[in-house]
Image (spheres, rainbow, N blue to C red):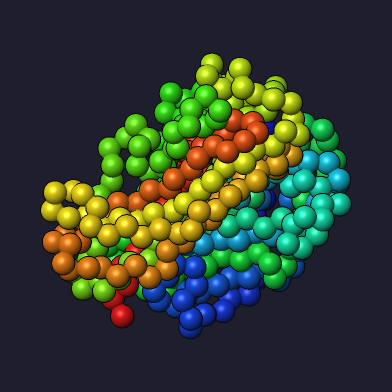
Amino acid sequence: MRRGIVVILLTLAMSAATATAPAGADAAPVTRMTLDQDVPLPAGTTTSVVRQAVDLAAGESRHIRGRINTTSSTARVVALTHRVLCLDSAGRQVGDSGATARNHEGSDTTYYAESGHLPLIADLLFTAPSAGTYVCEVRAWTASTASDTYFLTATAGGTWLEISAADQSGAQWWANPECSSRGTSPTCTYIGPWSSDPAWVFYRDGTPVLKWRAADDARAVRALANVTLTTCYKNTASCQNSTVEPHMKTRGTDSVVDARFQLAQLDPAGRTCHLHSTPMSRLSIRDDAHHYAAYFSLPDIPVDPSCGTRQFIMRVHIKYVSGNPVKIDGRQSSTQLTHGIAMNLTD
């Protein structure tokens, strides 16, 4: 159970810098607030790790990107959810939060890029409903059924929050449908050995396809998507579906999927005029990690006037290959564990 929010004071834990080169998928400079001191993440607690204020006019949008890098005091598996969100002057969350999740697999883990260090990234397109000052932040929640004496640590330098310095006018936010933590929502998507059909995130998910129009002065588009995937092994509480259960195997079987990110410009009939795609990626998802964050980016997609429209659709192709079934996570209350953003490039 989440036992409140621990707030780390800005003056003690952070330093700000403005990056003049694009970061993430932004067309403009960003302001980065970097953690200067390690911050403990106690068991069962939500911690506000990095915060940054931004003044916005009504309807003004910003791309918010957060990164958290964590170490662990235990060799046991520990759950970690990383969120980026923005608050109004009363401290209330405004709109969605963007989130990713993955279990930290222990202090002795050697297969991370840096041994024992688990990084997670989350993105958010935030649009101010009214003029004012908003505080955007990186939050971390951690829990374990094995112990309540462990703690994770958000590490200095590797943990930061970025806010784009200019209005992301006309940008679009995509989000997966509701899928509860236990996987009981009828809009949850599962893939597994019962079907060779791929899942199409943001496209064939039971909701209307979102068509986005690039701005008239946009020469190109930058797009990104973050997808959280959950392995469905026997006795997990995260997957509840009669189709999935007969195919669940013991923990340690792991899962393998193929994934590709696509952005398609449409013609006037709604057909694909140009299809832009990342290479197919083979993702190996360990059952110990349980939740897995996959990141995709198409940094510079030209808008072709010969297509006859400036409309685009976004989708992520995910195909089961082997191992345990996989759940594609989505909205949990106002938290989006699978999300995408498209932004105009006008320079």
| Image: 267 above or below 228 | below
- 57 vs 293: above or below: below
Residue at 78%, 41% (x, y): give it: 77
- Above or below: residue 59 compared with residue 315: below
- Marker count (numbered): 0
> What percent of the width, then of the height, locates residue 55?
40, 68
In the drawing, does residue 47 fall left or right of residue 194?
Answer: right
Residue 26 lies in what quarter of the image?
bottom left
What residue is drawn where x is 52% and y is 80%?
A: 18
- Give above or below for 100 relative to 53: above
Drawn side of residue 279 relative to residue 271, left or right: right
Q: Residue 284 location, x and y as percent?
A: 65, 46
Q: Quadrant of residue 345?
A: bottom left
Quadrant for the C terminus in the image: bottom left
The answer to whether one can see residue 129 in this image is no
Quadrant of residue 128 in the image? bottom left
Quick one: 346 or 55, which is closer to the camera?
A: 346
Residue at 18 percent of width and 48 percent of height: 270
Q: Nearer the viewer, residue 168 or 252?
A: 252
Q: Which x, y percent locates residue 88?
A: 43, 54
Residue at 81 percent across and 37 percent down: it is 148
Residue 337 is at least partly visible in this image: yes
| Image-based side of 220 in relation to 100, left or right | left
Where is residue 269 drawn, in percent x and y?
A: 14, 49
